[in-house]
Image (spheres, helix red, strand yellow):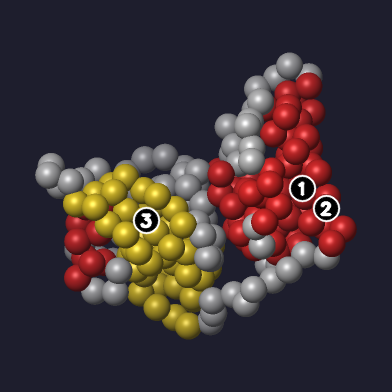
Amino acid sequence: MNAARVSIFPLSGALLLPGMDLPLHIFEPRYRALIHDAMARDRRIGMIQPRGDGPKPALFDVGCLGHISQIEALDDGRFNIILKGLARFRVIRELDVATAFRQIEADVEQAPEDEVLHAVERAALEQESRRFAEALGYVVDWTAVSRLDDMSLVNGIAQIAPFDPAAKQTLLEADTLGERSERIIQLMQIIGRIERDGGTTMQ
């Protein structure tokens, strides 16, 4: 890991994973300032989930560093951006800064190597995903899904599935692709049981 100063965007429920894209609409003044600062430097910001509410909530320990790969500046000062996940980081401490946005010192991991699932793991994930989509009434292009590589499939589901923020955090913190895939299956099964019992989803 490498220690680095990271400007952060704390956002509940927004999961960024290495290699994945996350579209964001930036409208708050402090985060507009964050984008201006990042564009003037290295186009990098850290996505991390807050642990609570309020003006300066505590943060989870692990987030993901992202690179602004696309940016659209709107006339009123807002931005639409696409953030490309680079590597996970672990918070060392929050820095005392004068900027409107928060900054931390973090240990940034090396960018992960491509990982693959065992055939049985891939089959289990696809099977549970089909059950899950059917239970929730989602329309999915399964032919396109079958063409995804393992990392794109697992991390894509982790980002878009309707899991609550704490559950998404456990997916981010999984150290291997196989572990993340297994956690996704478990979460889908939990939500599926809730749906069958007539309750609400975790979202």
Q: Is residue 33 above or below residue 134?
A: below
Provide residue 39's location: percent of width, then percent of height.
23, 67
- Mark 2 is on which residue type? Ala
| Label 2: how many Cα within 10 Å (few below 14, some 14–19, many 20+) | few
Numbered badge on residue 82: 3
Q: Is residue 191 visible?
A: no
- Report the residue marked by disc 2: 123
Element type at mark 1? helix
Numbered badge on residue 54: none
In this rendering, position of residue 33 left or right of residue 20: left
Q: Is residue 39 visible?
A: yes
Numbered badge on residue 126: 1
Provide residue 118's location: percent of width, then percent of height.
83, 65
In this rendering, position of residue 34 left or right of residue 82: left
Provide residue 153's location: percent of width, then percent of height.
65, 55
Residue drawn 45% across the image and 72% down it: 106
The span from disc 1 to disc 2 (Cα, nearest Å) is 5 Å
